[in-house]
Amino acid sequence: MTLIQSIILGIVQGLTEFLPISSSAHLVLIPHLLGWSLPEAQVFPFDVLVQLGTLVAVILYFWSDLWKILKAFFQGLVARKPFEDPNARMGWYLILASIPAGFSGILLKDKVEAAFNDPNATAYFLFGTAALLILAEMLGKRTRSLTGMKWFDALWMGLFQAMSIFPGISRSGSTIAGGMTRNLDRPSAARFSFLMSIPVMLGAGLVSITDVIKMPDLGSFLPILLVGFVAALLVGYLSIHWLLSFLNKRSFYLFAAYCVLLGAVALIVGAVQTKAQALISTPAIAQTIQIDQTAAPATGTLDQNPLTVAYTSSLEWLLPAMTTCAGAVEDFSIITHSLPADKLDPAANAISLRWGPPEDLTDYSAALGSERLALIVNPQNPLISLTPELAQKLSAAEFTSWGDLFQKCPECFSGAPDETIAASVPALNFYSAAEEPQQIYVNAVMAGRPVASAPALLIPGGTQMRQIVAETPAAFGFIPAHFLNESIKEVALAAIDLAALEKPILAISTAEPAGKTRDWLICLTKALNP
């Protein structure tokens, strides 16, 4: 992530956290629409920090109200009259309103994480936000103010807040809509919506900040995080002030129209990008495929439509083929989710695609094809081959520079590296231990030896690995072979059984696929074995 991207996304977070147009949707869709390939290892901590920026903004804006609420709340507890003071009651209402979101976040965690990886799902949720805003305007009488608020109003708005854990459902939009359906006027509903965001955002921030602290290479990424934090804080403060003024005179129809427009644009752009990628990445299946109905016995039990398909980042390149094959099967569709390898547990009525078998495979599985691991460097690096022994030393950070490796093995290079490359320390790039490329590399190349940790950068997936190596002259990494293109250079491995670098692509399910699900898998098998 660059400094400019951080500023832009910080401004987007500050604007959209409080406007009823879904900040989470914008943080998912803006990089998607602009074609940014942000490393997933950086996206999560960035989202956490910019949300903390808007949390600070709302605390600063409502500091006077919060102080009165906190003071009255604790005074009521001490005096054993917790509900006597209106400000104390407001404190209890805020606690009550926060409970539904907490439970929904725990119960629906996996589904929410999958939705954050699916721009199409985010677009459809934006339509849901638009519908909520329109219904609130049509049904709400707007006859009550915040002083007349009751406990059920708070609980009701809390239930609406629980829906907003999905990207595309605006937290402020859904909670304000909930308040308006209880006949609160727009400014009162908005004011309580902003106040009730504080406990939820504070709790989510405290839970997530520990993961941010554990982030590899946090020190070098911290300045970019702080710039986004400050941008979100400043813009968030201004957007609260503007919206409260706006709602005194205007309705939510303008925001509803915006949500519909953004959702439609996201779906159109996504469809165009998927079609273009399919034509480029999978020419063998660009035309309609005839399904062989007798290729496998129809004795299975898994025949789900639409079919949920979970896949690891190592198989991102297979997504166009998945989509094309879904179109080749009549009246059939799929819902795709990209998940980390250690989160890819087979679920009922779903298919999991992964590269190589997991250690504890006990479910039904079928090999669709195979994929090979490729070692890569930047095209400026004249390295052309490695032995396993040299690869092990390189990955264990035993070479102080590329020139040092050249001295040990000049025949491994097509020519002497220039002064810049020769003096550069190899920039090592690995994946987390659970990801398939890392497992294959450690087992086949490292012979079980650990790779370097301190000087290495952890990369979330093949697309990001390719990008990092293409942009860094001193970089070294490895990717599934389908990610290879002209922006990087493959390095040959000498004196090694190449079969150890090739693993099957498995379709794993809790039951044997049947019907249209089986037809889709047959199509995918043909795409992988033209």
Image (cartoon, rainbow, N blue to C red):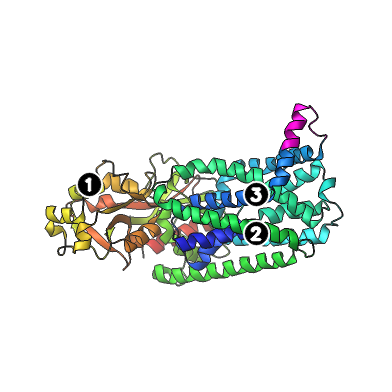
**Spot occupied by residue 526 in the image (x, y as percentages of width and height):** 40, 63
Q: What's the residue at 85%, 46% (across, down)?
A: 148
Label 3 sits on residue:
60
Residue 312 can be seen, yes or no:
no
**Which tag, 3 or 2, sits closer to the chain's start?**
3
How far apart marks 3 and 1 lie (CA) works out to 53 Å
**The disc labelled 3 sits on which kind of residue?**
Leu
Q: Quadrant of residue 242?
A: bottom right
Q: Is residue 65 left or right of residue 529?
A: right
Which SS class for mark 3?
helix
* Residues under numbered marks 3 and 1 in contact, where contact means CB atoms less than 8 Å apart: no
**Spot occupied by residue 246 in the image (x, y as percentages of width and height):** 74, 63
Q: Nearer the viewer, residue 370 or 175?
A: 175
**Which span is picked out in magenta?**
71-84
Label 1 sits on residue:
392
Question: Which numbered circle lies on residue 238?
Answer: 2
Q: What's the residue at 45%, 45% (across, down)?
A: 364
Q: Is residue 151 left or right of residue 395?
A: right
Judged by depth in the image, the label closer to the viewer, 3 or 1, is: 3
**The disc labelled 2 sits on which kind of residue?**
Leu
How far apart marks 3 and 2 lie (CA) works out to 11 Å
Q: What's the residue at 20%, 56% (across, down)?
A: 402
**Which tag, 3 or 1, sits closer to the chain's start?**
3
Q: Quadrant of residue 525?
A: bottom left
Q: Is residue 78 magenta?
A: yes
**Spot occupied by residue 473 in the image (x, y as percentages of width and height):** 28, 62
The quarter of the picture where the C terminus appears is bottom left
Q: Nearer the viewer, residue 61 or 139?
A: 61
Residue 221 can be seen, yes or no:
yes
**The disc labelled 1 sits on which kind of residue?**
Gln
